[in-house]
Image (cartoon, coloured by chain):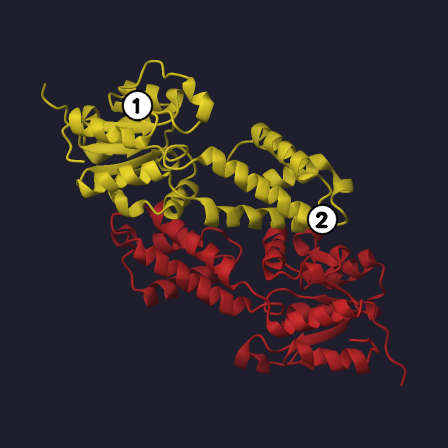
Chain colours: A red, B yellow
Amino acid sequence: MPAAALDVVLFDIDDTLYSTTAFAVDARRNAVAAMVREGLRVTEEEGVKELAEVVAEFASNYDEHLDRLLDRLGPSRWGGRNPAVLIAAGVVAYHQTKEKELRPLPDALALLDALHAAHVRAGIISAGLRVKQAEKLVRLGVLSRLDPSAIFFSDQMGVSKPNPKIYAKACEALRVAPARAMYVGDRPETDVAPALAAGLRTVHYRGAHGRHADRRATPPAHHEVERLTDLLPILRETYGLPV
Amino acid sequence: MPAAALDVVLFDIDDTLYSTTAFAVDARRNAVAAMVREGLRVTEEEGVKELAEVVAEFASNYDEHLDRLLDRLGPSRWGGRNPAVLIAAGVVAYHQTKEKELRPLPDALALLDALHAAHVRAGIISAGLRVKQAEKLVRLGVLSRLDPSAIFFSDQMGVSKPNPKIYAKACEALRVAPARAMYVGDRPETDVAPALAAGLRTVHYRGAHGRHADRRATPPAHHEVERLTDLLPILRETYGLPV
């Protein structure tokens, strides 16, 4: 059987190149702990639970989660502190968590390294705010493994997931036929289904969400992997790439 | 001569507790250098000069300085990079500079320590965005030396420098007569003159700006110091404080 041709492998960022879920848990806990050390009168457990509710109720890119946390706890819990000081303590702890813990999953890095060594173009299609998403690529240290012209953020494209157009437009910009592009992501609804609809080869990465990963993509992706390095034999055998 | 009475010493943050000017120079240079490493086609010197112009032309709390830097250099200088990636590289370098270099001036820390040890209330009156200014206090590590109820940001008060009301309102909130409050700041027009007009004891700190510090305050402050620790003998002798 002749190998299918593949010109570019495009990746999701969140919960694919790094564990966004695990990072968010740590960062929020560190933020609450710093606010408590600064005088906020709440147990770390209660604060974390309330903050999780704030994040669920307000948009995830909303930048006043800690303000709303203080609002919902009420001034009697502020310990006589200026609320801006409590918020700032949380913000600094959140940033310090980024600095310390925003690292690529080892398998993601190994796969990007193998693609880079084999001169296979690798890129990004990510939904979110452009600089916020780009900051993740900088902090993950993966930019040197990516084709600079193959980095796409929904915020810059005027179209976002789950619209299949985001995948079609990226291929158009790369001058690659969708059938010769692969997309690797963790979410059936926003990554697999619309990339399939746009005609790309799709990979459902199921390793990021632990037990929740049992959910299968419908329609199914071309390939399903528990670890990103599981893609290496597929890229060799199905696509004939020298990785 | 009986000692004048003093109940609280209030401080400016920028160029008083730390060298804002020196920090900004380093942070901007580091941001430009990171953008150049990421592919921006400009010399570090030209980039720093252009960025200084952006900061001068747009508001200092404007949060898109790096976007405007790329705009003014033009797409031909972006090296085929997604501009969000270049901006993110600069943003990360700017944050890393905060993490590494935002430290209080040794004299400021020594003075705050002496006030704290002597149980003299110390606080802040600062013009700027509440969380941004509060973040500086967190990063400078000075909050444990300050009275939590004596931290005032213009952004929360609805009045800003150089309106004397900002000083009057802070004293009112503290239930301290202005004549028994001292304000320490570096700028004649925004710190000394309006605090004097509000009836506070004033200190013109002239150490932050190097040769530009030759400019005297008009009207003159009650006290003028080159180093913040020069205030210690004044607080002892003129105000009878056990520092």
Q: Is residue A61 left or right of residue A149?
A: left
**Chain where mark 2 sits:** B
Instruction: Look at 72% across and 61% down and name the residue there.
Output: A146
Residue for point 86% across, 73% down: A5
Residue A6 rendering spot, x and y as whole percentages? 83, 71
Q: Specify the farthest residue to the top.
A: B219
B175 relative to A107 in the view: left or right = left
The secondary element bearing badge 2 is classed as: loop
Closer to the camera, A59 or A3?
A3
Q: Is residue B139 above or below residue B114?
A: below
Please indicate whether residue A121 sits to the left or right of residue A127 in the image.
right
Frontmost residue, A145 versus B106: B106
Q: Which residue is mark 1?
A: B195
Q: Where the N terminus of chain B falls, by quadrant? A: top left
**Which residue is outermost to the bottom?**
A1
Which label number is shown at residue B39? Answer: 2
Q: Quadrant of residue A47?
A: bottom left
Instruction: Give me the disc on residue B26.
Output: none
Provide the chain ID for the residue under circle 1: B
Identify the amino acid type marked 2: Gly
Q: Quadrant of the C terminus of chain B?
A: top left
Residue positioned 26% across, 29% down in the render? B231
Residue kind at label 1, given as amino acid type: Ala
